[in-house]
């Protein structure tokens, strides 16, 4: 073979190998790109949803707690990674429920090491490999996924009794479980679309009495743990919250979007209103006039739009109020509220969640705005900010904050898009 022919042969072979290497590399890149779109796989562009936990005895920063036990008993570390969490409810120290908007209800008995799903609609065992059986189970899972979670209530007298409110096809419903979420029964359904069950609350002294609030301002009461319901009040306006506070004389209250706070001390047979007012903050911050959220331009001390009212139960009659896109606190509803001034340039912000320290009350408050977590230990005179949370990927918005009772340094965050 001539030198020229030998050189040409090497060149041809080298070119072929380079071409093959290029095609292989391209295939790997395309494969990786497609894998990044598979739910549950992490990459640098993913947004973490589900839940986070901070336990200083384990680590200084937050960590993901999204592992779910599957029907087969395996542990899926990304089982909640794409779920929008609506609410976290504590049953006891390590026993928590997480209600999601798109994946149903979950329970942990070990502080979030892993979660097991609680099905609103029964799902059979996945034993067997038949295609027909797999289709049946997928249909049952799809039915559970159709539940849009709204509210979760655990009976204070009986932790095995819980209620979930939500919607299916935009129809408001309530489900009851009497076995700690293992099985559920539908106990209430709206007839028409578009009227969600905003809140469910169980009486603190009589666990048979259950209340429900519809979005349009109707208050319902059941005297037989949800078996039957009757209307006890119709406010005929947008309502945002209903709750029972055992620590405050078992007070039943409703918060209306424009009309504010109404309460009943006789199980909803009669109602009274307290007009909530505000004054300047303790650090000299004045309330900025914003007529777009005021009910009346002549009422400078009143509120225009109410969002949430949080009783501070370790100190009787203290409250946190979300109203007019700001945070307020008061030691008594009959006294003016004072603004908690956040370290933000824009005074108007959308607060997603507020948590009050179970031991220190309003002397320690945590607030979430978008993906930022704020904390004050002196009633808003100063704040610490954690907008990085300390995990490798970007997180969604913080929808709920829970402070553990027995160790107030342990925090849980629910995340949502």
Image (cartoon, rainbow, N blue to C red):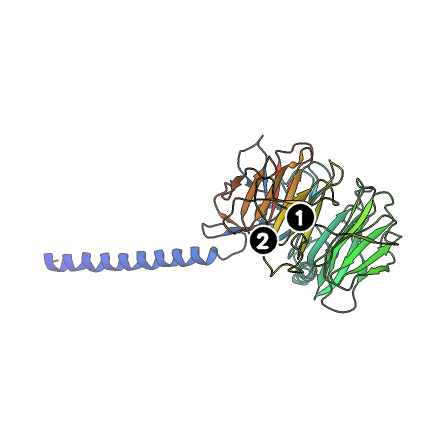
In the drawing, what numbered circle is on residue 350?
2
Question: Which quadrant of the figure contains the N terminus?
Answer: bottom left
Q: Is residue 74 visible?
A: no
Please tell me which residue lies in front, 146 or 367.
367
Estimate the spatial distance between the alpha carbons at disc 1 and disc 2, rounded to whole Å. Answer: 19 Å
Query: Which of disc 2 and disc 1 is earlier in sequence?
Result: 1
Q: Secondary structure at mark 1?
A: strand
Q: Looking at this view, is 136 or 91 the one in front?
A: 91
Does dot 2 land on a helix, a strand or a loop? Answer: loop
To which quarter of the image does residue 237 belong? bottom right
Position of 256 with respect to 417 (left or right) is right
Label 1: how many residues lie within 10 Å, few (<14), some (14-19) or many (20+)? some
**For the C terminus, which image quadrant?**
bottom right
User: Left or right: 316 with respect to 46?
Assistant: right
- Is the residue 206 above or below the residue 226 in the image? above
Residue 260, visible in the rendered structure? yes
| Percent x, y of residue 23 | 34, 60
**Residue at the disc numbered 1:** 278
Marks 1, 2: nearer the viewer: 1
Residue at (78% x, 56% y) in the render: 175
Picture coordinates of residue 138, whole percent (x, y): 66, 60
């Amino acid at each position: 073979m001539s030198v020229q022919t030998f050189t040409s042969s090497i060149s041809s072979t080298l070119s072929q190998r380079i071409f093959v290497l290029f095609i292989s590399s391209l295939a790997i890149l395309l494969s990786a790109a497609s894998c990044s779109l598979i739910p549950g796989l992490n990459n640098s562009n993913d947004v973490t949803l589900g839940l986070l936990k901070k336990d200083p005895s384990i680590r200084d920063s937050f960590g993901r707690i999204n592992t779910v036990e599957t029907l087969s008993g395996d542990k899926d570390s990304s089982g909640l990674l794409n779920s929008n969490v609506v609410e976290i409810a504590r049953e006891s120290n390590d026993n928590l429920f997480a209600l999601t908007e798109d994946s149903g209800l979950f329970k942990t008995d070990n502080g979030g090491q892993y979660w097991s799903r609680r099905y609103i609609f029964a799902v059979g065992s996945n034993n067997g490999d038949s295609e027909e059986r797999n289709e049946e189970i997928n249909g049952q899972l799809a039915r559970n996924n159709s539940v849009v979670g709204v509210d979760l209530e655990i009976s204070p007298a009986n932790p095995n009794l819980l209620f979930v409110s939500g919607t299916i096809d935009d129809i408001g419903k309530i489900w009851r479980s009497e076995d700690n979420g293992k099985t559920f029964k539908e106990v209430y359904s709206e007839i028409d679309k578009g009227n969600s069950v905003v809140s469910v609350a169980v009486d603190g002294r009589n666990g048979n009495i259950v209340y429900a609030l519809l979005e349009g301002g109707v208050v319902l009461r059941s005297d037989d743990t949800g078996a039957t319901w009757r209307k006890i009040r119709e406010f005929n306006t947008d309502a945002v919250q209903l709750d029972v506070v055992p620590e405050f004389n078992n007070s039943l209250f409703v918060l209306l979007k424009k009309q504010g706070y109404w309460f009943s001390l006789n199980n909803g047979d009669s109602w009274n209103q307290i007009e909530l007012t505000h004054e300047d903050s303790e650090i000299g911050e004045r309330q900025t006039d914003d007529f777009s959220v005021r009910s009346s331009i002549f009422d400078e001390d009143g509120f225009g739009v109410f969002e949430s009212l949080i009783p501070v139960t370790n100190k009787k009659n203290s409250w946190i109020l979300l109203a007019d896109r700001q945070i307020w606190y008061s030691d008594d509803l009959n006294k003016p509220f004072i603004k908690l001034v956040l370290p933000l340039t824009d005074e108007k912000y959308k607060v997603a969640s507020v948590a009050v320290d179970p031991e220190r009350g309003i002397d320690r408050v945590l607030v979430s705005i978008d993906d930022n977590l704020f904390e004050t230990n002196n009633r808003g005179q100063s704040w610490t900010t954690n907008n990085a949370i300390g995990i490798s990927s970007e997180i969604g918005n913080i929808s709920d904050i829970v402070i553990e009772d027995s160790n107030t340094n342990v925090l849980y965050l629910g995340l949502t898009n």
